[in-house]
Image (tube, grey):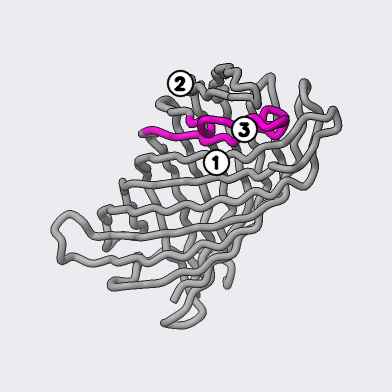
């Protein structure tokens, strides 16, 4: 009888007003440039968010501000340039979302939402040398995007709820900044600038499952397995000028290859 009672649904009771959430995370991260290279490692992260829910702003019944940071030590492998282990990686992501609550008095609340996001991934292999003798270099990927998604939450008895989200991320634009490897700067050579490649095509995806348990009227804990994916097209070319000690100059032009990244993991969130 207890098992049957547990699965009885009742009217959803999302919290109106302001709420705060703090969530450590653990995930497996993979970045690939097919045919060229791969980075892979375990990421440790922390996400903080403020959410407002109410009925004072017309159709806007949910506003959420979110910031996430994560760190990793990734292993680099490449067919052409060997491998490097233990490269420091870090990621910062900020998002602002607005949505509306459909069927707020029913068993299940559905919240479609949209907003703006920024993601920065930094990879720092400057000063490291691969197994084939290739010099490492620093990279920074900057994405600007617009998330559009839907979140679902169903309340059960005994303070439990089950939900999840599906999201599509419209890629607005991006910038890939790449430092000049040390072997291009030897013998007194100077470089006009870093490579800065503009990116204009791509998309992202998100999905997660949320299992929530209210601790009391003020606190709740959420277990959230999740998956995230990015697919970015080849960038525009960019050129730099290298001048050696004899004032001879040469121009080098590069593109950022088409790439994809995937991340799957779990967050444990505490709601206040």
**Does the stretch in magenta take in 193?**
yes
Q: Tell me the residue that label 2 is attached to.
A: 236
Label annotation for residue 180: 3
Relative vertical location of residue 257 with respect to residue 22 in this rendering, above or below: above
Residue appearing at x 64%, y 35% in the figure:
31
Residue appearing at x 39%, y 40% in the figure:
144
SS at badge 2: loop
Do callouts 2 and 1 mark residues in contact (Cβ within 8 Å)?
no
> Which of labels 2 and 3 is toward the front?
3
Asked if one can make out residue 6 in the rendered structure from this viewpoint, the answer is no
Residue 250, quarter of picture: top right
Q: Residues within 10 Å of mark 2 (few under 14, many from 20)?
A: some
Relative vertical location of residue 44 with respect to residue 86 in this rendering, above or below: below
Q: Residues within 10 Å of mark 3 (few under 14, many from 20)?
A: many
Q: Tell me the residue that label 1 is attached to.
A: 140
Q: CA gap, disc 3 to disc 1?
A: 13 Å
Residue appearing at x 18%, y 65% in the figure:
55
Return the disc, 3 or 1, that comes first in the chain's sequence. Answer: 1
Do callouts 2 and 3 mark residues in contact (Cβ within 8 Å)?
no
Q: Position of residue 195 (x, y in %)?
A: 53, 30
Return the disc, 2 or 3, that comes first in the chain's sequence. Answer: 3
Q: CA gap, disc 2 to disc 3?
A: 18 Å
Q: Nearer the viewer, residue 268 or 158?
A: 268
Do callouts 3 and 1 mark residues in contact (Cβ within 8 Å)?
no
Bounds of the magenta span? 173-196
SS at badge 3: loop
**Does the stretch in magenta take in 182?**
yes
Return the disc, 2 or 1, that comes first in the chain's sequence. Answer: 1
Left or right, 271 with respect to 138, comes to: left
Q: Position of residue 237 (x, y in %)?
A: 48, 19
Relative vertical location of residue 14 with respect to residue 91 in this rendering, above or below: below
Residue 268, quarter of picture: bottom right
């Amino acid at each position: 009888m207890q098992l049957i009672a547990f699965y009885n649904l009742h009217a959803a009771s999302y919290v109106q007003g302001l709420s705060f959430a703090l969530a450590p995370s653990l995930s497996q991260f993979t970045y690939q440039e097919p045919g060229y290279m791969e980075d892979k490692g375990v990421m440790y992260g922390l996400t903080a968010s403020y959410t407002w829910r109410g009925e004072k702003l017309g159709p806007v019944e949910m506003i959420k501000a979110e910031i996430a940071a994560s760190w990793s030590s990734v292993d680099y492998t490449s067919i052409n340039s060997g491998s490097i282990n233990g490269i420091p990686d870090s990621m910062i992501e900020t998002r602002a979302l607005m949505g509306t609550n459909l069927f707020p008095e029913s068993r299940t609340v559905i919240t479609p939402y949209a907003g703006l996001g920024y993601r920065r991934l930094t990879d720092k292999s400057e000063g490291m040398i691969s197994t084939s003798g290739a010099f490492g270099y620093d990279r920074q990927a900057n994405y600007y995007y617009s998330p559009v998604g839907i979140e679902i939450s169903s309340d059960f008895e005994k303070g439990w709820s089950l939900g999840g989200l599906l999201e599509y991320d419209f890629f607005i634009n991006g910038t890939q900044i790449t430092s000049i490897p040390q072997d291009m700067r030897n013998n007194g050579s100077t470089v006009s600038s870093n490579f800065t490649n503009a990116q204009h095509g791509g998309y992202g995806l998100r999905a997660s499952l949320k299992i929530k348990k209210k601790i009391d009227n003020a606190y709740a804990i959420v277990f959230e397995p999740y998956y995230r994916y990015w697919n970015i097209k080849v960038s525009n070319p960019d050129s730099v000028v290298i001048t050696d000690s004899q004032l001879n100059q040469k121009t080098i032009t590069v593109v950022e290859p088409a790439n994809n990244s995937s991340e799957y993991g779990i967050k444990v969130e505490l709601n206040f």
